[in-house]
Image: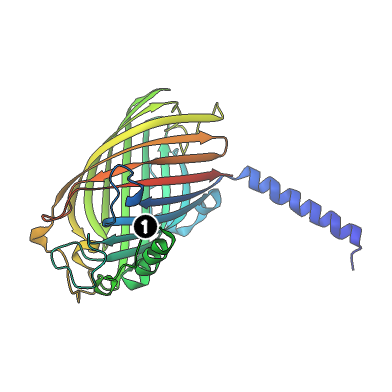
């Protein structure tokens, strides 16, 4: 048996080796929270009402065989692969009645696990983000439990009573690609054109977008996560405007495989063209990033209203 001193020496060597590996490889952990209560100018509790996501990127994930289904871009591009889990919750306007609300948005929740890849070209000022996910729609997504749990922690909030009418359980398959091209990319001003497509059993859509940012932002196409390389502190404000050209949305129309729903939004009532806007601020300090802002979306169906919610996201770089 090795002596106590030898065991201690082996442990110290192992620790130093692990520390060295950890320093040599880049990793990013992000937590994001979205809720319409964060829309401070006009708080509501309806439509898209809550979202939570967690993302983890690490250089070792680039060896995963799942990368073959993602978009890599040019072989000289910088790339990073990660995994994410995301829950989203949708409700009608009236959360107190247990009756079926035939003329409003149906209750729905989704839970999706995805593999994601970011591919960046410094030479050509473009960025490709792609993801492939699998998940569930319906009770297995946990929307009823999570929303009532949040309400139990919130002053003057009551239980939500209509979840027994939610869109039924179904399988979600999701594939997304977003392409961003920098037209103006300076130390203080950035202007991009972007296009995103989403395919699968969750949503089918095409979304063009324009993006403008002002601040200290000189590295968006120089590294995968757009971190400042020559300073410990960076801050910028941004705004975007886009249009969703929608063909199908399972949270409104029900799933593809299970169509035994009490209430859905019919095709004739669905708005195929939906405008959206966002504003926000992002702050980088050393190995921490904080981002917060507001998203506005035009009405999803003919009897709906426009809607807005806030978000906050925090990231740690290792």
Judge by depth and name the residue closer to the eye, 187 or 281.
281
- Colour scheme of the rendered structure: rainbow
299 above or below 286?
below
Horizontally, is 83 left or right of 160 in the view? right
- Identify the image quadrant of residue 122: top left
Q: Position of residue 234 (x, y in %)?
A: 49, 29
Q: Position of residue 256 (x, y in %)?
A: 22, 69
Query: Dot 1 surroundings within 10 Å: few (below 14), some, or many (20 or more)?
Result: many
- Residue at 19%, 46% (x, y): give it: 298
- The residue singled out by tag 1 in the image is 132
Q: Quadrant of the C terminus?
A: top right
Q: Position of residue 168 (x, y in %)?
A: 26, 73
Q: Position of residue 21 (x, y in %)?
A: 66, 48
Q: Residue furthest bottom?
A: 260
Judge by depth and name the residue closer to the eye, 18 or 316.
316
Q: Residue furthest left?
A: 268
- Residue at 35%, 46% (x, y): give it: 310
Horizontally, is 208 left or right of 32 in the view? left
190 above or below 315?
above
């Amino acid at each position: 048996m090795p002596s106590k001193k030898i065991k201690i020496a082996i442990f110290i060597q192992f620790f130093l080796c692990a520390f060295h590996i950890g320093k040599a490889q880049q990793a990013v952990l992000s937590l994001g929270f979205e809720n319409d209560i964060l829309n401070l100018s006009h708080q509501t509790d309806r439509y898209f009402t809550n979202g939570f996501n967690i993302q983890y990127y690490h250089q070792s994930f680039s060896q995963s065989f799942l990368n073959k289904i993602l978009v890599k871009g040019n072989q000289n591009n910088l790339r990073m692969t990660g995994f994410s889990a995301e829950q989203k919750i949708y409700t009608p306007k009236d959360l107190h009645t247990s009756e079926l609300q035939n003329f409003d948005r149906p209750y729905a929740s989704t839970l999706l696990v995805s593999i994601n890849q970011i591919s960046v070209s410094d030479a050509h000022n473009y960025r490709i983000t792609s993801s492939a996910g699998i998940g569930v729609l319906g009770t297995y997504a946990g929307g009823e439990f999570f929303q009532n749990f949040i309400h139990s922690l919130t002053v003057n909030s009551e239980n939500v009573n209509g979840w027994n009418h939610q869109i039924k359980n179904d399988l979600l398959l999701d594939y997304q690609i977003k392409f961003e091209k920098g037209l103006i990319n300076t130390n203080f001003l950035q202007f991009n054109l972007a296009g995103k497509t989403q395919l699968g059993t969750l949503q089918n859509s095409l979304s063009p977008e324009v993006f403008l940012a002002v601040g200290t932002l000189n590295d968006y196409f120089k590294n995968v996560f757009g971190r400042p390389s020559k300073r410990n502190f960076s801050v910028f404000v941004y705004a975007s405007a886009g249009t969703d050209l929608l063909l199908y949305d399972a949270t409104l129309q029900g799933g593809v495989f299970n169509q035994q729903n009490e209430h859905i939004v019919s095709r004739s009532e669905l708005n195929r063209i939906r405008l959206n806007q966002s504003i926000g601020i992002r702050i980088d300090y050393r190995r921490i990033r904080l981002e917060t802002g507001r998203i506005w979306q035009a009405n999803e169906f003919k009897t709906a209203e426009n809607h807005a919610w806030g978000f906050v996201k925090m990231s740690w770089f290792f």
